[in-house]
Image (cartoon, rainbow, N blue to C red):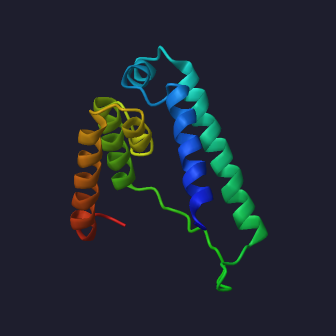
Amino acid sequence: MKHLRYLLLGAYFGIVLTKSEVTTWHKIRAMFYFREPDLYLIIGLGVVVGSICVWFVRRSKPTTPFGEPVVVQPKPMHKGVFFGSFLFGIGWFIAGTCPGPIYAQLGGGEFFAVFTLIGAIIGAYAFALLKPKLPD
C-alpha cells in the first residue's frame, strides 16, 4: 500500500504519454523524418529538466536515507558511447519507441510492443554479457 502513489503516478504518466500520442509508432517515425517537431521539443524539455536536476543534486550535495552522499559521476566520452548511441537510435527508429514508453504502449493496447519489450530485454542481457569486453 505504501507504493500505491508511485503506481498511480506511473499510470498517470503513461496515460499522459498515450493521450499525447508520443508513444505511437507513426508519430515517432514522423519525428525521424523531421515531420513532427513537437517530439523534439518534448525530448529537449526532458534534457533541460534532467540537466537542472543533475545540477541541483551536484550543488545541494544530498545524502541517502543511510547518510551516504549522492554523487553524480561524470561519464567520459569515447567511441563506445558513439556506437552505442547510434545502435540505440537505429533500434528506436525501427521499433518506433525507446525503452521508456514500451509499458505505455502495452497499457494502451498496442500488441506489437511485446516484441519491442522482448528485444529490449535481449539487448540488455547482450550488453551485460559483452560489458567486460567493451571500453570503459
Above or below residue 18? Residue 85 is: below
Q: Quarter of the image for the C terminus: give it.
A: bottom left
Query: At 22% from the left edge and 59% from the top edge, which residue is drawn?
Result: 126
Left or right of residue 12: residue 60? right
Q: Tell me which corner region of the image, top left, top right, bottom left or bottom right, holds residue 7.
A: bottom right
Above or below residue 75? Residue 109 is: above
Query: At 58% from the left edge and 66% from the top edge, which residue is drawn?
Result: 1
Q: Tell me which corner region of the image, top left, top right, bottom left or bottom right, holds residue 65.
A: bottom right
Count of numbered circles on the image: 0
Q: Tell me which corner region of the image, top left, top right, bottom left or bottom right, holds residue 104.
A: top left
Q: Position of residue 39 (x, y in %)?
A: 54, 26
Left or right of residue 98: residue 129? left
Q: Position of residue 32 (x, y in %)?
A: 41, 23
Of residues 34 and 24, the one nearer the viewer is 24
Left or right of residue 101: residue 17? right
Q: Residue furthest bottom?
A: 67
Of residues 59 and 79, the one nearer the viewer is 59
Above or below residue 69? Residue 101 is: above
Q: Position of residue 134 (x, y in %)?
A: 27, 64
Q: Residue furthest front?
A: 1
Of residues 76 and 20, the one nearer the viewer is 20
Q: Residue furthest top?
A: 35
